[in-house]
Structure formats: C-alpha cells, structure tokens
Image (spheres, coloured by chain):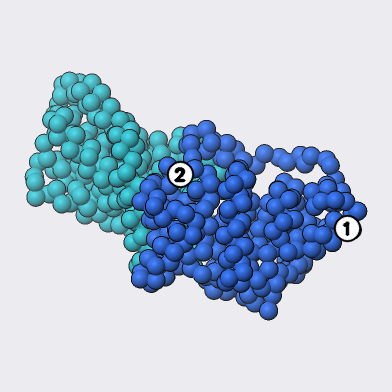
C-alpha cells in the first residue's frame, strides 16, 4: 500500500487556486521531498494531507484513510514538524513531550519510556527540565522532531525543518531521520529550500510551481533530464529564475511581530 | 478528561511561571481603583452615595476578570499559528475538549487575577459587608471568567489574524466595561443607557459581585446567577462549535 496517495487535488481560496489538480503518491518507507518556490503551494498541500485544511476537489489517502472522514485515525498515523515552531516556550522540554503523549493517549508508563528514549536520541535528555524558551533554534527543532515521533507515527511530515539551522545541526538532524527511516521504515515527507539537502536525502522529489507539479522523479533523473549538474540548477531551469512576487500575508506580518516582540 | 485536564494545567503553569505578566496585568485595575476610587471619592460622598471605594471595588474586580478572560481567549489567534495549540489541532482528540480545557484554564487564571485585585482592594480600604457571602462572590467571579473566556475563544475562532484586534478592543471590550455599571450606580439613568446596560452580560457579573460583597444589588443575586449561567453555557457551546471549525 502507498503511504500517501493524492489524486486531482485542488484547493481554491476565494478564487485563487493555491493547489491546482495535482496527483502523486509516496511509497511506504520512502523519503520524499516536496520542492518549490515560495507560494507554490507546498504548505497548503501539507495542511490538506494532515487534516488541517479541507480540499476543494480531489482525493487524499493517508495509509489508505481519508483525512476528512477518518480524521482521528489519520491523525494518529502521522507526526508533523510545522514550519513555524509550535512548542510551548513556557513549558520544559519534558512537559512539552508529556503533553503530546497525553493528547495522543500514550499510556503513562510507555510514555515516560519513550520520552526518555527520544530525548536521548536528539541529545536533549540532560536539558529535559529546562524551559523551552532557553533553547536555541536547533535545540527546539530537535525537540519538535522528538515530539512528532512520540506516538510511533508511520508517516513523518516536516515543513522546512532545517530553515535557519547551521550545517552541523542540519546534518545531525538528517542523521537521526535517516536512521529512523531505515530502522522503523517510517515514511518521510519533507519540504525544503536547500536543494543539496533534497538531492542528498530524498529518494524521490516532486517540484511544484504555481500550484502544479511540474516534475517528479529521482533527483539524478531530474538532473539528467535537464542536462544540468545539480538539483539546484535543474530546479532553476524548471521553475525559472524570476523571483516570486508574493503578497505579504497576514501570517507573514504576524511572524515579523513575533520576531520583534518575543525573542525565541 | 485527560485532554481537558492537561490543557487546563498548561494554562495554569504558564500563568504561574510568568511573574512579570501577573504584575503587569494588575497595573491597570490598581490604577483604576486608586485614581478613580480616591479621585471621585469626595464627590460621591457629597452626592450622598457613601464610600466610593466600597462601590467601585466589585466593578474593578469584574474589570480585571473581563480583560484577562477575553485576552486569554483571543490569544488563540496567536497560539494556533505559533504555539502549542497548533500541535493540538492535529492531535486525535475532539476539538471541543481542547476548547473546554483551554477555556477552563483561561477562566481559572482570570479568577486568580480577580482574587488578587480583591486582596489589593482590602488594602485600599474595602470592607466586605458579610464574610458568609464571600463564597457567592467567588462563584460569580468564576462564572464571569468562563463567560468571557468562551466569548474570546468564539471571536478568536473566526478571526484569522491580529488585524481585527483593535476593533475588538474599541467596539467590544471597552463598551462591555463602561456599560456594565462598574463605575457608576444604575439608578436614575437615561432609559437608553439602562437598556444598553441590561444587555451587557458584564453588568450581571458586576451586580452579583456588588450584591455579595456589599449587599447593594440592582438586579438581585438570583437574576445575576441565572443570566451568567445561561450566557456562559450558550457561549461555551458557540465557542466549541466555532473552534471545531477552525482551519489553518
């Protein structure tokens, strides 16, 4: 069975088509990268895959289940790291994981065991009782990864997980994820703007632009097709060099305020 | 139940850990209590209405509950984009439980704020008339807190960003406060003002507090309790419904 199956998926917001009739599937146990310029429809697609947004048209199957109709089963089957941090800064690392475990109904004993295992994996065990607001960006990302894995998901969604992280942290993060993918056969679906990352990590990539999938395949196939040397060059050939004029959305303004007022 | 409890606990932990926020949010009620209380005191006395601090204190307690409650509801706009709440929206739990847990948490925090203002008012010279009635004052505080946290949640579930916030401040929170009888007696007012005041749910919170703390009540305690309970139930239901429809 495919982990993710998307057929003719469309999302319109007041006449604007954010995602335009896309179809693709991700095999179970695969590492799949979803690439595209800003505003191409990546985050909107992830939101629909993860039950946060209803599609206008088309169908989605997550492990064979419908995110709209079998919401809770779908929710139990995936973990997610959002583009914007979603930890509670006023709580400790341990409390953040504990709360997640309660929400996902992981029994207490198993929960404590799993929290220890995961905090050790992401090397935050000795900081478990520190408030998250004292963490660096990289530590927060690692904690979010640990949290997303707590309930043993079969699919792991990561929306620009490495944004703003230094190469050391990025490297280490992908090490965990690749190990996990091998050991537990967990499917990984991620978006990124770092093309070398996608080229190195992903088994297949899809490139989305203006809401449409314009290319899909193994990184080296895309490179060969376009006659270039790297995925980054191939990406630029496929999507063009023009910088996207994106209207500043209210969410961008909120992000800005957040940077100004709260120093995370 | 676990979900409701853990969300309630989260709100409480956040509150107890941010001492600066507790102190900051007490600034306004304390200023109102001292500046208005002592400023208008002599004139209130001359008008034959007695001690103004005695009259004003229930209003200021209600005010601090109103502000803390609505803000804690409105915080959802922020929290669902950049906070823990977003995490809860993809969790396999019914949305109404998330809403109820968060509302109870916000309401508990607001009740605490009200209690702190009450203690401060004792320092300013406020004297509760009958200690046995304090339990009713406490219940009115809890109900008022639940009512306005649920209202804040309902509003925040419809708004998608902070743009509408100024509008809510000026056209909802301020009128709710000024038209509640928190600052002035309700006797002998122009008809239209009386009607507006009777439509403001906060009026019943203020009146209930004033009734149980000082023995002076305009509507009487039974009416206050009934109105507060009914509106709380309606708004919690409405808030849960709107909250469960949130898409982000």
Q: Label 2 is found on which chain of the structure?
A: A
Looking at the image, residue A57 sits to the left or right of residue B104; the answer is right
Where does label 1 land, which residue?
Answer: A224
The location of residue A248, given as percent across then percent down, is: 67, 39
Q: Mark 1, residues whose alpha carbon is within 10 Å: few (<14), some, or many (≥20)? A: few
Where does label 2 land, which residue?
Answer: A135
Q: Nearer the viewer, residue B96 or A22?
A: A22
Q: Label 1 is found on which chain of the structure?
A: A
Q: Nearer the viewer, residue B13 or A174?
A: A174
The location of residue B97, given as percent across then percent down, is: 41, 64
Are the two marked residues, 1 and 2, in contact with CB atoms closer than 8 angstroms? no
Identify which residue is drawn at 41% across, 39% down.
B173
Note whether A141 is above or below B88 in the view shown: above
Q: Mark 2, residues whose alpha carbon is within 10 Å: few (<14), some, or many (≥20)? A: some
Note whether B39 is above or below B237 in the view shown: above
Looking at the image, residue A244 sits to the left or right of residue A63; the answer is right
The location of residue B247, given as percent across then percent down, is: 58, 57
Q: How many marks?
A: 2
Chain for colour blue: A
**Chain B, chosen colour in render:** cyan
Q: Nearer the viewer, mark 1 or mark 2?
A: 1
The location of residue A151, given as percent across then percent down, is: 48, 68
Query: Which secondary structure, mark 1?
Result: helix
Q: CA–CA distance between discs 1 and 2?
A: 42 Å
């Amino acid at each position: 069975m495919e982990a993710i199956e998307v057929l003719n998926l469309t999302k319109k917001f007041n006449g604007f088509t954010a995602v335009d009739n896309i179809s693709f599937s991700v095999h179970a146990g695969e590492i799949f990268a979803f690439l595209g310029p800003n505003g191409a429809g990546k985050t909107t697609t992830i939101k629909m895959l993860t039950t946060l947004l209803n599609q206008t048209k088309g169908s989605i199957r997550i492990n064979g289940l419908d995110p709209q109709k079998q919401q809770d089963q779908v929710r139990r089957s995936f973990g997610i790291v959002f583009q914007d941090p979603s930890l509670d800064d006023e709580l400790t690392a341990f409390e953040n994981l504990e709360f997640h475990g309660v929400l996902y109904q992981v029994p207490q004993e198993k929960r404590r065991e799993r929290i220890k295992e995961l905090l050790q994996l992401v090397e935050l065990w000795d900081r478990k009782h520190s408030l998250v607001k004292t963490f660096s960006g990289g530590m927060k990302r690692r904690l979010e990864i640990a949290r997303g894995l707590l309930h043993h998901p079969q699919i792991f969604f990561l929306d620009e997980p490495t944004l703003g992280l230094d190469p050391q942290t990025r490297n280490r993060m992908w090490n965990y994820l690749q190990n996990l993918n091998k050991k537990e056969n967990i499917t990984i679906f991620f978006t990124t703007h770092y093309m070398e990352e996608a080229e190195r990590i992903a088994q297949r990539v899809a490139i989305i632009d203006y809401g449409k999938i314009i290319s899909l395949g193994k990184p080296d196939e895309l490179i060969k097709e376009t006659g270039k040397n790297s995925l980054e060059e191939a990406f630029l050939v496929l999507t063009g060099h023009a910088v996207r004029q994106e209207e500043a959305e209210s969410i961008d303004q909120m992000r800005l305020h957040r940077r100004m007022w709260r120093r995370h | 139940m676990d979900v409701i409890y853990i969300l309630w606990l989260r709100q409480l932990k956040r509150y107890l850990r941010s001492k600066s926020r507790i102190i900051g949010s007490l600034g306004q009620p304390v200023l109102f209590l001292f500046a208005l209380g002592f400023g208008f005191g002599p004139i209130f006395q001359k008008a034959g209405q007695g001690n103004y601090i005695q009259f004003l204190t229930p209003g200021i307690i209600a005010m601090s509950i109103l502000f803390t409650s609505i803000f804690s509801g409105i915080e959802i706009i922020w929290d669902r984009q950049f906070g823990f709440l977003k995490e809860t929206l993809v969790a396999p739990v019914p949305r109404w439980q998330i809403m109820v847990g968060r509302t109870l948490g916000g309401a508990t925090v607001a009740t605490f704020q009200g209690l702190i203002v009450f203690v401060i008012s004792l320092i300013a010279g406020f004297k509760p008339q009958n200690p046995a009635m304090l339990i009713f004052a406490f219940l009115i505080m809890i109900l008022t807190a639940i009512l306005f946290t649920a209202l804040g949640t309902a509003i925040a579930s419809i708004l998608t960003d902070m743009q509408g916030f100024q509008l809510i401040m000026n056209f909802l929170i301020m009128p709710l406060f000024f038209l509640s009888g928190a600052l002035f007696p309700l006797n002998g007012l122009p008809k239209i003002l009386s009607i507006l005041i009777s439509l403001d749910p906060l009026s019943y919170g203020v009146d209930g507090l004033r009734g149980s703390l000082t023995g002076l009540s305009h509507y009487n305690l039974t009416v206050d309790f009934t109105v507060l309970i009914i509106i709380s139930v309606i708004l919690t239901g409405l808030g849960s419904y709107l909250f469960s429809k949130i898409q982000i």
